[in-house]
Image (cartoon, helix red, strand yellow):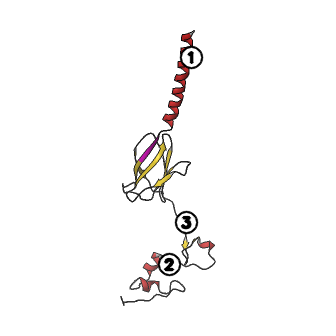
Amino acid sequence: MELRLFSKKVKILLAAFLFFGVLVAQAQTYEINGTVSDETGAPLPGVAVVVKNTTHGTTTDFDGKFTLSDVQNGQTLVFSFIGYKTIERVINSEAALSISMEPQAEALQEVVVTALGIKREQKALGYAVQEVSGEDLQKVTGVDVSTSLTGKVAGVLVQNSSDF
């Protein structure tokens, strides 16, 4: 009888240790270091590195390096940067990551910056917008760029000045 009680207590105690041991193992956090570069190996500064579905994240420094603490196994890091494809990487106790981002070949929509520095789509402006393309400037047989611009855009006064 006494052996049976001892055996039952040992089983309960063992089950409790296993249960809490698993909880502690799952709660371990890591500090992840790494570098982010483009396809040529050049570092990418300013890449957003965020734990997926959270607000926990950082950005890469001038050398493309980042450090992110309190990351758990199984969490997913999301790497995003304008003009590049977003990359997701699942963390599995790696201390150092090396991420290579590929450019995203997409045409950007036309944006006009107004005199106040406010970005707007051209169709949303309440006034006329004119543009001069590089091809238009090459077609003119002017001596320099300023003479090529003369008369191309309404309201623009082009003056040559050699008083530098």
x then y, percent, for residue 65: 39, 54
Of the two numbered discs 3 and 1 on the same chain, state the one appearing first in sequence: 1
- Considering the numbered disc 2 on the image, is that residue within a helix, a strand or a loop? loop
Position of residue 150 in the picture relative to residue 5 (left or right) = left
- Which three-letter amino acid code belongs to the residue tagged 1? Lys
Q: Which residue is mark 3?
A: 109
> How far apart, in angstroms, are the residues tagged by discs 1 and 2?
87 Å
Residue, x 55% and y 66% (percent of image)? 109
Does 65 appear above or below 96? below
Residue, x 64% and y 77% (percent of image)? 126
Does 24 appear above or below 113? above
Residue, x 54% and y 29% (percent of image)? 19
Q: What secondary structure is the magenta-colored segment mainly?
A: strand
Q: Closer to the camera, 94 or 86?
A: 94
* Crowd rating for badge 2 (residues with CA inside 10 Å; few <14, some 14–19, many 20+): few
> How far apart, in angstroms, are the residues tagged by discs 3 and 2?
17 Å
Of the two numbered discs 3 and 2 on the same chain, state the one appearing first in sequence: 3
Residue, x 55% and y 70% (percent of image)? 111
Q: Which residue is mark 2?
A: 132
Q: Which residue is mark 1?
A: 8
- Considering the numbered disc 3 on the image, is that residue within a helix, a strand or a loop? loop
- Which three-letter amino acid code belongs to the residue tagged 2? Val
Of the two numbered discs 1 and 2 on the same chain, state the one appearing first in sequence: 1
x then y, percent, for residue 36: 41, 53
- Which three-letter amino acid code belongs to the residue tagged 3? Gln
Q: Residue furthest front?
A: 2
Magenta residues?
27-32
Does 26 appear above or below 116? above
Q: Can I make out residue 131 in this image?
A: yes
